[in-house]
Amino acid sequence: MVVPRGHGLIERPEPASPRPAQERQGLIAVLEDDLEVLVAIRTVLEVSGHAVVAATSFETLQEELRRRDRVPDLVLTDHNLGPTTTGLEAIRALRGTYGAELPAVVLTGDSSYSFLESKAEEHNFTLLAKPVDTRLLLAELERRLASRQGEP
């Protein structure tokens, strides 16, 4: 299964388990303005045993996190979030609220990939190009979650 760039068919994900679901901990905050892509990502993460709060806008994501009184353990965001917000801006704001060490993964399907590569190291986030293979995505999320939880 591949997470699409957008405006594509949503298929049921193949269960991919780098670690058993019962061992997974934490909450992944997902921000993606394309509803089809958001549903695909959320489904992949939930089938893989992750807790997810997902939204198509930054404001809605903030409201959901406040409503649930939960602190995210990782943020997964698209880079282009409509005309007024970028994934990098969302990461900065979430880190301002939840701590500078909040792990982040940015997905992008646009041509600014090389520009974002330089920003990834500077702002401590992982950059993945869409479409992204779900095994790669899940492995990277596990790696970032493990580093947050102090695992090897």
Image: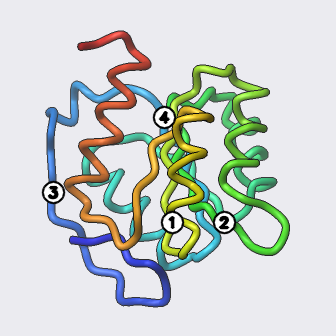
Choose top left, top right, bottom left or bottom right for residue 135: bottom left
Q: Which residue is tagged 4?
A: 27
Whichever of labels 4 and 1 marks the residue nearer the N terminus, that label is 4
Work out whether 106 lies above or below 123.
Answer: below
Whichever of labels 3 and 4 marks the residue nearer the N terminus, that label is 3
How would you rate the neighbour count of disc 1 (Cα within 10 Å): few for under 14, some for 14-19, many for 20 or more? many
Dots 1, 3 in contact, CB < 8 A: no
Whichever of labels 1 and 2 marks the residue nearer the N terminus, that label is 2
Q: Amino acid at mark 3?
A: Pro
Work out whether 17 lies above or below 94.
Answer: below
Choose top left, top right, bottom left or bottom right for residue 80: bottom right
CA gap, disc 3 and disc 4: 19 Å
Q: Which residue is tagged 3?
A: 15
Q: Amino acid at mark 2?
A: Thr
Where residue 122 sits: x, y (%)? 60, 34
Work out whether 88 lies above or below 142.
Answer: below
The quarter of the rendered structure image containing the N terminus is bottom left
Dots 4, 1 in contact, CB < 8 A: no
CA gap, disc 1 and disc 2: 15 Å
Where residue 125 sits: x, y (%)? 52, 39
How would you rate the neighbour count of disc 4 (Cα within 10 Å): few for under 14, some for 14-19, many for 20 or more? some
Left or right for 8, reference 124? left
Q: Residue at x 59, y 64 (%)?
A: 32
Give the structural element (helix, strand or loop) at label 1: strand
Residue 108: give its label. Answer: 1
Q: Residue at x 22, y 29 (%)?
A: 22
Give the structural element (helix, strand or loop) at label 3: loop
Q: Amino acid at mark 1?
A: Thr
Q: Which residue is tagged 2?
A: 56
Q: Amino acid at mark 4?
A: Leu
